[in-house]
Image (cartoon, rainbow, N blue to C red):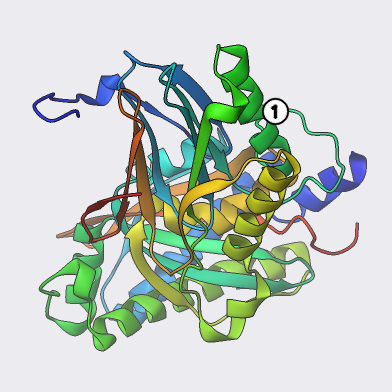
Amino acid sequence: MPEQVVKEKKLAGPEMAGIVGVGVTKAVSGLSQMAGVAIEVTSVKYTKVKVQEVPDLFGGPGSLIVGVYLGISGTSNGHMIVAYQPNVAFELIELLIGQAPTAIDALNEMERSVMGEIGNVMGSFFLNHLSDTMGVSLQPSPPAVMVDMAGAILDVALANVLQYSDYTYVIDTTFGTKDHQISGTFLVVPDAESSIA
Amino acid sequence: MVTGTVLTREETIVVGIGEIKVAQFPVPVLACIGLGSCVAVCAYDYTTKIGGIAHVVLPSSSGREVVGIPKYADIAVPRLISEIVQKGGFISRIAVKIAGGAQMSFAPGIKDAFKTGERNVEGVVNALERLNVSIAAAETGGNKGRTVHMYLETGKITVRSTGGDNRQL
């Protein structure tokens, strides 16, 4: 249906690769400012994948990940999940508060809030770039931090994608300080019921 | 029982998001891994040892034509049952158990915006009612992910929540 194609193009599609690439760079620069440490993007891959294969990009549907969820609202509605492998989340937390968590399945309030803030900063920088470039208005919701199986964290976002397509776009990125390589995966999906063509 | 049998990853058939898989013993195991708001509908015929799982993602197709994966409860549930019947199962012998439909813990402000898990469970229950198939056991809701295994030799179904142990359903 042509109407749905237009909706999908709002936030995802092959023509978005350039915008998304710069968006990720901005997101990482936000993290860099927040941490007060130079962090650089080493790679950004923007790929179209089958929805069933998305959990594999996060280490498989059963692997434990730390996911920061942000709802997107404004000109288009959608979902954004920034996910990290547990060891990466450990490094990020250590980078920001100088102390690594003891156990990933029992993040304390401070550690959760650090992960939420990372998601918030990266999401805001990313969406600001999209908004500026595309002349639209996109705002992130407050972050929700989840520690669970990748499949479970991704379900709601993927359920939204599956209402209009069996494929979606995923951003795989690695970034790091000069001592640490950090990798993260961004999933940005437009809402099926999101507004107007 | 499968005790003593070492199950390798290759022997487990994984049912991906939105998919339906039906198999007969000696295929050992079907699995749905990392269910959040999705629901695993597990159907098993104890006589022929034919079982299947539908990994339901959305409650209703709302009459839309569905191509590709059968992700909606109203499409997937009848298809699961009919695939088991086609393989030689018998509808009156099929036992159905369901698991999943969690409400993942999103931020307070956006929690009510999508009750996908709850709606998926409703969609599955409605679809089964239309087929006159009752639910033998269910473990739904909560806010943690689940992994479901179906052992085709016995029909045993186990559910494990994130950070928890396997429980028999």
Q: Name the quarter where the C terminus of chain A is drawn.
A: bottom right
Q: Is residue A161 above or below residue B79?
A: below
Q: Nearer the viewer, residue A169 or A105?
A: A105
Locate residue A185, reporting x and y percent.
Answer: 42, 52
Number of numbered markers: 1
Q: Nearer the viewer, residue A5 or B17?
A: B17
Q: Quadrant of residue B47?
A: top left
Locate residue B3, reporting x and y percent.
Answer: 12, 30
- In this orientation, does residue B58 appear? no
SS label for mark 1: loop
Q: Quadrant of residue B5?
A: top left
Q: Quadrant of residue A103?
A: bottom left
Q: Which residue is mark 1?
A: B68
Q: Nearer the viewer, residue B99 or A132?
A: B99
Please give left or right for residue A164 compared with residue A24 in the image. Answer: right
- In this orientation, does residue A152 appear? yes
Please give left or right for residue B153 compared with residue A7 in the image. Answer: left
**Residue drawn 19% across and 25% down?**
B7
Q: Nearer the viewer, residue A72 or A63?
A: A63
Q: What chain letter is assigned to the residue under label 1?
A: B
Q: Is residue A164 above or below residue A90?
A: above
**Residue drawn 55% across and 12% down?**
B88
> For mark 1, does the 10 Å Cα neighbourhood hold few (<14), some (14 to 19), or many (20 or more) residues?
few
Q: Is residue A132 above or below residue B37?
A: below
Locate residue B44, reporting x and y percent.
Answer: 47, 30
Please give left or right for residue B144 compared with residue A71 in the image. Answer: left
**Residue drawn 48% across and 41% down?**
A54
Q: Name the quarter where the N terminus of chain A is drawn.
A: top right
Q: Amino acid at mark 1?
A: Gly
